[in-house]
Image (cartoon, rainbow, N blue to C red):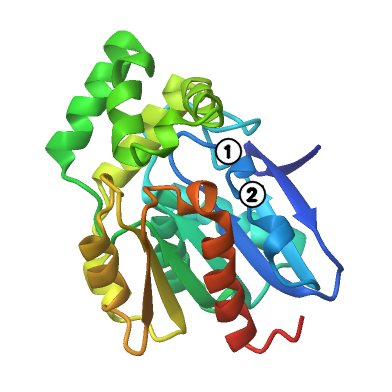
Amino acid sequence: MHMAKLGDLRLHYRVDGPEDGTPVVFANSLGTDFRLWDPILPLLPPGLRILRFDKRGHGLSDVPPGPYSMGALVTDTERLMDHLGFKQAIFVGLSIGGLIAQGLAAKRLDLVRAMVLSNTGAKIGTRDLWDERIAAVRAGGLEAVADATMQRWFSDTFRQTEEFPAWRNLFLRTPAEGWMGCGAAIAGTDFFNTTAALRLPTLGIAGSEDGSTPPDLVRETANLVPGSEFHLIRGAGHLPCVEAPEAYAERLSAFIRAQGHAG
């Protein structure tokens, strides 16, 4: 278990792979921790140096009082990568992690040489929608939004599996203050103009059954970056790395190799 002290914030992180490996950074969704990526890691090419972390308010990281700003989440990630010596990384961000990817690429292109925008948008939802969800959680905890979230996140088929309850439990164990803080960050973010100004290799990945960031939103966001690619994973929802790890890892691996990784 590793904690990085970044000013007045401590972030929980894990690094796997050789020190001289191709750097890849993963940023997960709202209401999960870095275990989100466990299903795909064994399926990725060898020789990668992989950084995963729990953003503020999630997992084993600190939970400062909210609300948070997207700028703070981007700065947290920037400081962590600087602290650990991750430069010119391939950055894989899912949902709010994809917003962090876009913000970090706009701020520090020396840290991000390629990005994967998975199940995300330049803008996700509306301020009113997030204000309603935050008010519901403040009044009734995450249980108040859990069922609706699970329906948006996972396909009908996956919700019938033995694996599904663990993901619902993971969501419910997220600190409510952290979830609301990050929800406020999403509510205040519109990266349309900044992402449209980016020029770096970009892959958009969407799930056909995603009720949180539908395929058209992901496609439109990826298309803001000239020369980007888009890939749809059929039958999967908001977390295709969980529902369809083989298909997800196959497309991600091809993108990583296209950036010059020889593994």
What's the residue at 30%, 15% (across, down)?
Answer: 144
Determine whether, in the image, residue 127 is placed left or right of residue 257.
left
Tell me the amino acid under the disc marked 1. Answer: Asp
Q: Quarter-wise, where is residue 99 in the image? A: bottom left
Q: Name the image quarter holding the C terminus.
A: bottom right
- Up-down: is 17 above or below 194? above
What's the residue at 31%, 10% (across, down)?
Answer: 140
Q: Position of residue 256 (x, y in %)?
A: 61, 78
From the image, tell me which residue sits under label 1.
33
Judge by depth and name the residue closer to the eye, 191 or 155: 155
Tell me the amino acid under the disc marked 2. Answer: Pro
Which label belongs to residue 39? 2
- Up-down: is 181 above or below 194? above
Please tell me whether mark 2 sits on a helix, a strand or a loop.
loop
Q: Quarter-wise, where is residue 84 in the image? A: bottom right
Q: Position of residue 111 (x, y in %)?
A: 59, 73
Q: Position of residue 213 (x, y in %)?
A: 28, 52
Determine whether, in the image, residue 200 is placed left or right of residue 156.
right
